[in-house]
């Protein structure tokens, strides 16, 4: 009797291959006190995710509006709170229009897929996976240019057959932590008649005066050909995302952005928390500078110990270790010494560039830094003995 094929066999085989390569991933449920570890792995750059002001705002909004938005933004999912947040984001970032999504990932999908449809899409090699997926969803021709290579971007734009084009880049890159050359990219897009889309996920709340972002800091906030995507789940300590741009951009996304049209709106509690975070940034303009200072201190500490890192533009500080097994071992060593560190392996990073990704927070204390130094010292010793 012929044996029935097992449809799950290929999945087990692939899982075994990933485990042998050191690429198996697993979920780890943390406790309310972060298991007693100093957090250098989350994206809570300003330490606002547990701030009582955000918690109280979210609690009150939940009492008034309920736990969910009840539908898509175009049906019942738009509340007065959503409109207020969009207006406040415009005022804060000096944007002309804003549209709130239930995640930053979906904001990128909408912006790139809708605005890039039928156009050439020029994407930077270091862009986040959400941008990579958005490029694919655009169904347009995509040219991937080397990291921060403005000359390659302009050449791709100049050589195109398509009438229209967009250039898309992270502002602060999510693993390397460096800053995109936004002024130069904008000049290239102006010369070539293209739109520039900038993902400010790791720069909003961190870069520039009051944390208004890298586009604002570069003097490009009022430029009509610049579109920004932001997340509310990192520096702003909440959930969700938004697209910032000209009215024509916002109208296009409302009419054609599939990840806007067909997704349930952001929950009111999260909207209210994000509003409270914007208030805090307005009233405590020193916070973005604090997190940048802490990031530079972490990078300096790593270099003193002989570890490979970059000069951070924002909160992200990578510690490059090479093979995935080394990064996994280093993350375990950090945890044993009281520090939770992010562990990034392919496909999140190129082969041979597995790393710890440390993320600074504005509220790290001098006592925290002493513990972190001890953990990184142990990582450096591990690297020497391997």
Image (cartoon, rainbow, N blue to C red):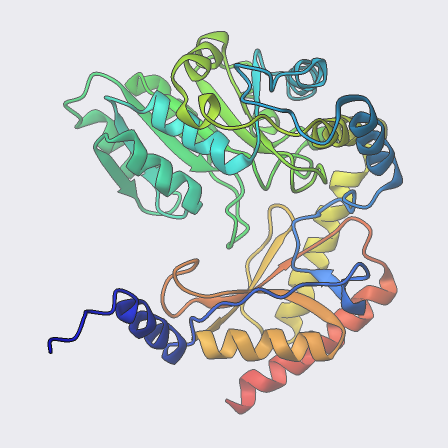
Q: How many marks?
A: 0
Q: Quadrant of residue 214?
A: top right
Classify 34 as above or below 180.
below
**Residue 374: quarter of image:** bottom right
* Residue located farthest toward the left when viewing the structure as drawn: 1
Furthest toward the bottom, the residue is 385
The answer to whether residue 199 is visible is yes
Q: Is residue 127 visible?
A: no
Q: Position of residue 339 (x, y in %)?
A: 72, 69
State the residue lying farthest toward the front.
1
Query: Residue 143, relative to residue 260: is it above or below?
Result: below
Residue occupying image coordinates x 87% and y 34%: 56
Q: Residue at x 40, y 24 (%)?
A: 258
Image check: 332 left or right of 126?
A: right
Across and down, in percent, residue 99 comes to 56, 19
101 vs 122, left or right, is right
* Residue 321 x %, y %: 50, 73
**Left or right: 55 in relation to 136:** right
Residue sitting nearer the eye, 365 or 232: 232
Q: Quadrant of residue 11?
A: bottom left
Q: Residue at x 81, y 71 (%)?
A: 370
Residue at the spot 62% in from the left edge and 69% down from the top edge: 303
Where the N terminus falls, by quadrant? bottom left
Query: Whole-percent x and y of residue 230?
Result: 57, 31
Q: Along the line of sight, which residue is nearer the eye, 128 or 136? A: 136
């Amino acid at each position: 009797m012929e044996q029935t094929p097992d449809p799950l066999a290929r999945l087990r085989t692939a899982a075994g291959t990933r485990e042998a390569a050191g690429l198996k991933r697993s979920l780890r449920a943390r406790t309310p006190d972060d298991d007693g570890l100093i957090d250098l792995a989350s994206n809570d750059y300003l330490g606002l995710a547990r701030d009582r002001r955000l918690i109280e705002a979210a609690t009150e909004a939940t009492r008034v509006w309920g736990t969910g938005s009840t539908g898509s933004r175009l049906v019942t999912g738009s509340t007065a709170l959503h409109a207020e947040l969009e207006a406040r984001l415009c005022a804060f970032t000096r944007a002309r229009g804003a549209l709130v999504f239930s995640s930053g990932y979906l904001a990128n999908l909408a912006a790139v897929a809708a605005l890039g449809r039928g156009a050439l899409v020029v994407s930077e090699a270091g862009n986040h996976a959400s941008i990579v997926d958005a490029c694919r969803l655009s169904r347009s021709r995509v040219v991937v240019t080397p990291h921060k290579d403005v000359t390659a971007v302009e050449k791709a734009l100049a050589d195109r057959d398509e009438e229209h084009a967009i250039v898309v880049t992270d502002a602060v890159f999510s693993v390397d932590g460096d800053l995109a050359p936004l002024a130069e990219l904008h000049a290239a897009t102006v010369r070539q008649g293209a739109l520039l889309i900038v993902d400010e996920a790791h720069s909003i709340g961190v870069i520039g005066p009051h944390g208004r972002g890298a586009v604002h800091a570069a003097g490009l906030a009022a430029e009509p050909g610049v579109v920004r995507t932001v997340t509310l789940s990192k520096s702003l300590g909440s959930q969700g995302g938004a697209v910032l741009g000209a009215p024509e951009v916002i109208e296009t996304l409302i009419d054609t952005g599939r990840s806007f049209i067909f997704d349930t709106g952001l929950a009111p509690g999260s909207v209210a928390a994000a509003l409270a975070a914007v208030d805090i940034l307005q009233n405590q303009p020193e916070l973005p500078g604090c997190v940048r200072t802490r990031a530079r201190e972490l990078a300096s500490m790593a270099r003193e110990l002989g570890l490979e890192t970059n000069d951070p533009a924002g909160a992200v500080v990578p510690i490059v270790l090479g093979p995935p097994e080394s990064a996994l071992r280093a993350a375990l060593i950090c945890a044993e010494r009281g520090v939770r560190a992010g562990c990034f392996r392919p496909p999140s990073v190129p082969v041979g560039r597995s790393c710890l990704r440390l993320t600074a927070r504005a509220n790290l204390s001098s006592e925290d830094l002493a513990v972190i130094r001890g953990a990184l010292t142990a990582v450096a010793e591990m690297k020497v003995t391997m």
